[in-house]
Image (cartoon, helix red, strand yellow):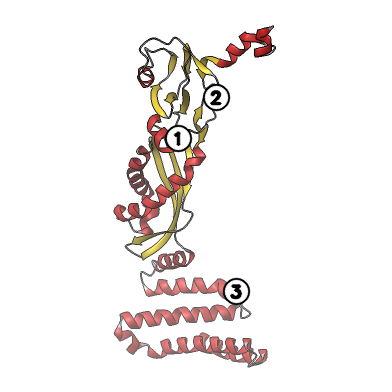
Amino acid sequence: MILDSIFGSKGLGGFIKKQFIDVIQWENPESNVLMWRFPLRDQEIQNGAALIVRDSQSALFVDEGSIADLFGVGTHSLTTQNLPLLTNLKNWSKLFESPFKSDVYFFNMRQQLSKRWGTAQPVTIRDQDFGVVSVRSYGMYSFRIADPAMFFRQVTGVCEEYRSEQLEEQIRNLAVTNLATAFGTADISFIDMAANQIKLSEQMTKLLQPAFAALGLQLESFTVESITLPENLQKHMEERIGMGIVGDLGRYTQYQTAQAIPKAAENEGGIAGIGAGLAAGMGIAGSMNAALNPNFAQVQPQATLTAEDHTVKLAQLKSMLEQNLISQNDYDAAKAEIIKKITG
């Protein structure tokens, strides 16, 4: 009766069961939980209790904030024989004669796959073709815990649970910090980067591995999937690629004509607009020929000047029409006369 009044309806047996733990294990860990503290609450660990560490797990004993002992895979009986560091911390001279209190942390040693990284803001790099530019990039990486004690000291500390998502911002910052260095040491221009992403990925992996190791982690892989320029530089690069077809000026004229056709189709002039685009291409080709071959201007000066003058005249007429300085009829008549001169 006295015991019931002290310990409640379950009596002394219920009190002892509540206070002493004889099995410590992490039964159903979530894949993205990296560290989990066994819930001791007010309980104490029984002398000779079983510690069960499953495959791809590790267990760390921490006593009053100090790392005591680390256990790998297996079933361990907790006695002074296999807790030497903890025994030394507590200055026990004899075998356990009573239960003890110590925090137990389990670590998930599995590889964390297909984690994504990316630059939240553009990263400024120096490129051998474009000079100083800002780029964005993203990709994937995989890692695992390699040193639970180091990971505990440097990352998790004494918290109840630590998830892989909590590392993402820190890893993204590491990637951004090293991206500019990787570009500089890879000796690859941006325009060739798409064909050399494997080399850049290898360079990034080499740069990041020491930073991961300092956190108790092992970087298994790091891939760069995409690198993009700001919109204005991307447009400039596309124009440069398009100019790559200028093996001779005839092909350049064809390229300019092809570029002018869809634009002309959107205008009121229709086929006349195509003619104007053709004239523009011819004019630019003539200018390039004159620059590259001084004799060209002496042979065909009139044709080049006429094509350029007509193109300018058409643009002026279009501008005057849009400003209501001339009527639609005046514009159509003048345009028809110019087109007639261009097409002969």
Identify the amino acid type marked 1.
Gly
The image quarter containing residue 111 is: top left
Examine the rendered structure and indicate whether residue 287 appears above or below residue 36.
Answer: below
In the displayed structure, does residue 289 sit left or right of residue 46?
left
CA–CA distance between discs 2 and 1? Answer: 16 Å
Residue that numbered label 3 is attached to: 265
277, 177: nearer the viewer: 177
Identify the amino acid type marked 2.
Pro
Residue that numbered label 2 is attached to: 39
Q: Which of marks 3 and 1 is nearer the N terminus?
A: 1
Q: Earlier in the sequence, mark 2 or mark 1?
A: 2
Q: Residue at x 46, y 53 (%)?
A: 119
At label 1, counting other C-alpha atoms closer than 10 Å, the crowd grade (few under 14, some 14-19, many 20 or more) is some
228, 91: nearer the viewer: 91
Q: In this rendering, does residue 32 appear at all?
A: no
Identify the amino acid type marked 3.
Ala
Q: Earlier in the sequence, mark 3 or mark 2?
A: 2
In the displayed structure, does residue 339 sit left or right of residue 250?
right
The image quarter containing residue 213 is: top left
Residue that numbered label 1 is attached to: 157
Q: Which residue is drawn at 45% across and 43% down?
A: 140
Q: What element carries label 2?
A: loop
